[in-house]
Image: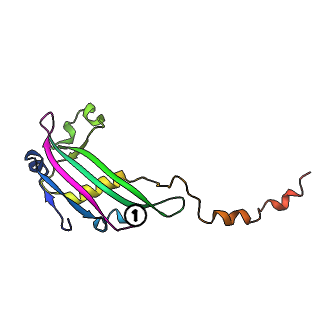
């Protein structure tokens, strides 16, 4: 999917459209700043359907691994991406009830005649990425060198009565 794919979201959902393929990580321009490397690709699948109340929905699935930066040791971490998003299309956001807005099983997306599929995938990846990724067990850079330094309070140690 090196080229932009634009769909009419309502038509795509109502007709049960389906797109799938592999997306190179290097093509995710808004995500690259959060990664330590841009190698590899992600598998995606976007399908349309009508929900239980006859409302148009998009189901997005994205799978793969991204290399994010550990905030503790600054090394790369293989972060498994497994996105399963149910996006209900709405023509008028004002018409949603409070109960619908509080339903965590799906998200709402304004219906668009020209929906950029790559931008949608990038949005979902950005929402999925951890804010401060860390290895479970790692040490700070130069942590061993710090223990050899003399404390600035060592001079005061001998003056305490």
Q: Which span is picked out in magenta? A: 33-55
Q: Quadrant of residue 106?
A: top left
SS at circle 1: strand
Q: Position of residue 126 (x, y in %)?
A: 34, 55
Q: How many marks?
A: 1
From the viewer's perspective, is 36 left or right of 4? right
Residue 111, placed above or below residue 104: below
In this view of the protein, which residue sits in the foreground, 30 or 135?
135
Residue at image x 20%, y 53%?
Answer: 45
Asked whether residue 12 is drawn in magenta, I would say no
Residue at image x 21%, y 41%?
Answer: 93
Residue at image x 35%, y 51%?
Answer: 128
Residue at image x 31%, y 37%?
Answer: 104
The residue that mark 1 highlights is 35
Q: Position of residue 3 (x, y in %)?
A: 18, 67
From the viewer's perspective, is 139 left or right of 59? right
In this view of the protein, which residue sits in the foreground, 113 or 13?
13
Q: Position of residue 1 (x, y in %)?
A: 20, 65
Q: Residues within 10 Å of mark 1 (few under 14, many from 20)?
A: some
Asked whether residue 50 is drawn in magenta, I would say yes
Q: In this view, which residue lies farthest toward the right?
A: 161
In this view of the protein, which residue sits in the foreground, 14 or 91?
14
Q: In this view, which residue lies farthest toward the top?
A: 99
Q: Position of residue 145 (x, y in %)?
A: 68, 66
């Amino acid at each position: 999917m090196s080229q932009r794919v634009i769909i009419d979201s309502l038509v795509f959902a109502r007709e049960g459209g389906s797109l799938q393929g592999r997306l190179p990580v290097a093509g995710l321009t808004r995500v690259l700043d959060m990664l330590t490397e841009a190698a590899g690709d992600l598998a995606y699948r976007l399908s349309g359907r009508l929900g239980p109340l006859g409302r148009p929905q998009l189901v997005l699935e994205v799978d793969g691994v991204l290399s994010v930066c550990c905030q503790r040791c600054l090394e790369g971490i293989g972060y498994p991406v497994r996105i399963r998003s149910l996006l209900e299309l709405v023509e008028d956001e004002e018409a949603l009830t409070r109960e619908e807005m509080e339903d965590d099983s799906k998200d709402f997306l304004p219906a668009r005649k020209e929906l950029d599929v790559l931008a949608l995938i990038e949005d979902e990846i950005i929402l999925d990425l951890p804010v401060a990724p860390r290895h479970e067990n790692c040490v700070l850079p130069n942590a061993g060198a710090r223990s050899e330094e003399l404390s600035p309070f060592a001079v005061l140690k001998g003056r305490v009565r």
